[in-house]
Amino acid sequence: MAPITETPEWKMLLAHRDEIEPLTLSDHFNADAGRFETLSFEVDGLVLDLSKNRLNAKTVELLVALADAAGLEARRDSLFAGDNINETEARQALHPALRDRSELTGGGVSANAAQEAARQKAFVDAVRDGQESGATSQKFTDVLSIGIGGSHLGPMMVARALRHGDQADPAVHFVANMDGIDISETLGKLDPATTMVVVISKTFTTAETVKNAETARDWITKNLGADGVASHFVGVSADIGAVERFGIPAARTFPIWDWVGGRYSLWSAVGLSAALPLGWTAFDEMNNGAHAMDQHFTQQPSSRNLPVLLGLADLWNVSFLGYDARAVLPYDHRLTDLPAYLQQLEMESNGKGVDLDGRPVPASSPVVFGGPGTITQHSFHQMLHQGPQPVPAEFIGIARTGHDLPDRQDALIANMLAQAEALAFGADGNGDPHRACPGNRPSTTILMDGLTPDRLGKLVSLYEHKVFVQGVVWGINSFDQFGVELGKRLAARLTGDMTAAEISQNYDASTVGLLRRYRAWRDKE
Ligand code: F6P
């Protein structure tokens, strides 16, 4: 296939960009009173408003044509049919099958997933009602979830979004970092007799997870004896043998499959550390919500398809307007972990330098960063409003709240709408250049009626498919992550030289200098 940049559709978009680039967002709104109606899209309690982006209906039409030229429909069908769409690793990417109870994807994959889901449900129910207990027969009051990346960010984001972890029964605690402070502070708060440790690692070789799991195992063994490991640990992995060698019995092991990528694995047993505190009903509702979005994605024409439109609008900003970052700003404290979750989903999926044929890509994932509004307003929004390099923003607001202080909710959403307005239209500062805000800064708003499990499932599925759409247009394999490996290899090489009598390997001068200084300070009495 010819590079996407050489297609007539790409060239038409470039010409169109040149035509509309001089128009400001104020010009767009002044020219079209129906702009919100034309450029906002709704499905089941979720509104996607693209109208504050620097585009118009013609842009959307041309972007949809570009997606067609990139073969989006065929690629999407391949994804759902279970083809080896992860070509560089010759694997399927069948995460939608995990939330599909109707065998749509064929090949027994959904049946297999449904069978495992039934096992997970039984386990979650048994832990929550105290039938499944630990070495001292006491009910588990706490779950310690150990994992990193896709084995951490998804369940953590969901558990915290749908229920404040520490009020849940069992309460859940997440540990990911190699830094020993993470695990030691967390263990310090827990009672080994009533703590279940869930170790989540697709490979079961990830250094951070293995180290943290070993520390937790020592803690359980020291307090409850070696037998405590079998009754207090749960393993989630694609490598069942490694879990067994670690000391976790088969009855407490839940498989994940090769055909689920780490950052898409929330829907598998990786989600256990969210399902345990939330309960199975909520977890299942979230799956169903995601499945409904899958159906929307597979069935709706691109011109009304939310993941397609969200992906294409962001691609327009990156590839045609040259914005290479995006701020994700959930105006709901429950979604505090969403930016970090999306960072992995988007930047690990599409942060690639070459396309499927090994040619340089025209663009790839923007820098994704963010945090919860209104907190972010008092840190980095200054730069969003006046910095010389505009950064598109993505606002996520929720109408119904998780608390009973309605005046706060109104204030919160007023702030969100005000930020989008200020970015779009700015202010002249009464002639004072220091006070002037230039405006014309694009933003997208996703407004949902509530943060129910169903809506959160839809939101996550929306983003998963959005990333896929962009990958297809840029020609990227969104399902591998080879770039992460080099750092892991070099860290393994350096580990020996942390303690060796003489630094043995050939490093660059900076690495040697820092290593020497580190060792000297570390060993100072
Ligand atoms: O290092 C990147 C990565 O491979 C992610 O893609 C993955 O989600 C994470 O590490 C954790 O991997 P695992 O589940 O195998 O421990």
Image (tube, rainbow, N blue to C red):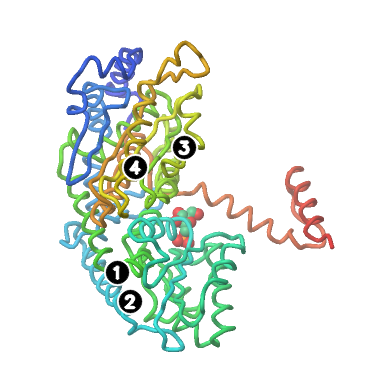
Q: Secondary structure at mark 2?
A: helix
- Name the residue carrying label 2: 128
The answer for how far apart the CA atoms under marks 3 and 1 are is 35 Å
Give the numbered dot on residue 279: 1
Q: Position of residue 497 (x, y in %)?
A: 74, 58
Q: Name the quadrant containing residue 508.
A: top right
Q: Callout 3 environment at 10 Å: few (<14), some (14 to 19), or many (20+)?
A: some
Residue type at numbered disc 2: Arg
Residue type at numbered disc 3: Val
Q: Secondary structure at mark 1?
A: loop
The answer to whether marks 1 and 2 mark residues whose Cβ atoms lie closer than 8 Å is yes
- Name the residue carrying label 3: 367
Q: Callout 2 environment at 10 Å: few (<14), some (14 to 19), or many (20+)?
A: many
The earlier-in-sequence mark between 3 and 4 is 3
The earlier-in-sequence mark between 4 and 2 is 2
Depicted 395 relative to depicted 455: above or below = above
The answer for how far apart the CA atoms under marks 3 and 2 are is 40 Å
**Picture residue at 71% right of the left edge, 61% below the top:** 496
